[in-house]
Image (cartoon, grey):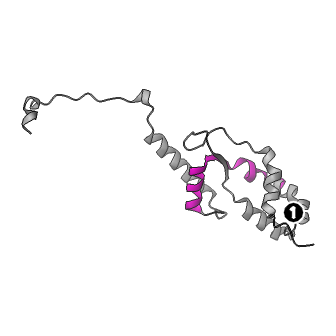
Amino acid sequence: MAKNTNKRISVKWVRDKAKSAYEKKTVCYICATNEDLELHHTHSITLLLNNWAIEKNYDISTDQGILMVREEFIETYKHEIYDEVYTLCNPHHVSLHSVYGKAPPLGSEARQGEWIEKQRAKYQEEYVAPEKLVVAKKTPSPFSPFAEFY
C-alpha cells in the first residue's frame, strides 16, 4: 500500500467514525461545569488501535488501510470506546493527562477511574452551596468587655 501522503493519523479516522455515537454528558463529571467539555477515554484509543493492528497484522499506515478495518476495530472495542469514558471539562482533562501522560498506558484504566473519583470527591467536599452554609454563632467571651485592652 502507498504511504499516507496527507499525514492524517490512523486514530483520527477511527475517532471521526465513532464520534456520531458518543454520548457526551452536559456537565463535567468532576466539577459539574457545563463549559469546555471533552470526552476522556480511559483506554487510549491510539494504543488499542496500534496493538490491535499489530495483532491482526493489518497495515493502518495509509488512509486506505485504516478505512478498510476501522469498523472492525470499533466493533471489537465498542465497550472501551463508548462505555469507559468520562465527560470532563478541559482543565480536569488536562490535569488527568498531566498525571497519566498524553496516551495513558493500557492497564491504567482503573487508576484513572480512581483519580477521577478522588477529584470529584475533593471537589464536592470543597464546594459548599451558599444556601447550605451554616454560620456558627460565637459565644461571647467573659472577657469581651476587656477586649479593648488587648
Residue 49, image x and y in percent? 78, 63
Q: Is residue 108 left or right of residue 19?
A: left
Q: Which residues are magenta?
A: 75-100
Locate the N terminus and report the quarter of the image it occupies. Answer: bottom right
Res. 120 in view:
yes
Locate the C terminus and report the quarter of the image it occupies. Answer: top left
**Element under label 1?**
helix
> Residue, x 80% and y 50% (percent of image)?
18
Residue type marked 1: Ile
Q: Is residue 109 left or right of residue 148?
A: right
> Residue, x 66% and y 55% (percent of image)?
42
83, above or below 68, in the image? above
Residue 91, image x and y in percent? 56, 51
- Magenta stretch, main secondary structure, is helix
Neighbor class of circle 1 (other Cα within 10 Å; few <14, some 14-19, many 20+) is many
Res. 111 in view:
no
Q: Is residue 135 left or right of residue 104?
A: left
Foreground pick, 79 / 41: 41
Q: Which residue is mark 1?
A: 66
Would residue 1 be counted in the magenta stretch? no
> Residue, x 74% and y 48% (percent of image)?
82
Residue 75, image x and y in percent? 84, 53
